[in-house]
Image (cartoon, rainbow, N blue to C red):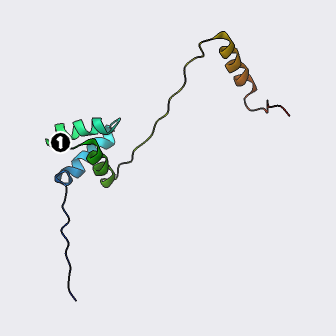
Amino acid sequence: MTDVKFYRPKSELMEFAEELKRHFEVQPPQNSNEAKEKIKEITGIERCPTQVRIFMKEIGMKIRKVGFIPGKASTPEKQQEQDDFKKNSGTFAGKG
């Protein structure tokens, strides 16, 4: 039986995979651009954000999406509406 070996290029970053993974577990980057800058700082290798995301997935890191908390209402009517909602939360306040 013939053993077929296809050419599969390896990223230069894989040499630094363990070091980078330890660093990112302690100080996770906010986005791929921040990760790109840290990788360049640690290894001297520069990659585009897309390649950085692919590398991060390969070493077992996950992208986390974050939300935001809306600010206070700007008008007195909206503030009253928010207060009423907080008071009635947990109870059915709909019509019908």
> Residue 63: x and y, percent?
39, 44
What residue do we see at 24% from left, 51% from top? 18
Q: Residue furthest bottom?
A: 1
**Residue on which disc 1 sits:** 46
Vertical side of 90 occupied by 21: above or below: below
SS under mark 1: loop
> Residue 71: x and y, percent?
54, 20
What residue do we see at 35% from left, 35% from top? 30
**Which amino acid does the dot numbered 1 rest on?**
Glu
What residue do we see at 31% from left, 46% from top? 53
In the picture, measured across the screen, residue 79 lies left or right of residue 13, that is: right
Viewport quadrant of the C terminus: top right
Quadrant hosting residue 8 = bottom left
Q: Residue furthest top?
A: 76
What residue do we see at 74% from left, 32% from top? 90
Vertical side of 70 occupied by 79: above or below: above
Q: Residues within 10 Å of mark 1 (few under 14, many from 20)?
A: some
Q: Residue furthest right?
A: 96
Q: Nearer the viewer, residue 32 or 14?
A: 32
Q: Nearer the viewer, residue 46 or 88?
A: 46
> Residue 2: x and y, percent?
20, 86
Q: Residue furthest left?
A: 44
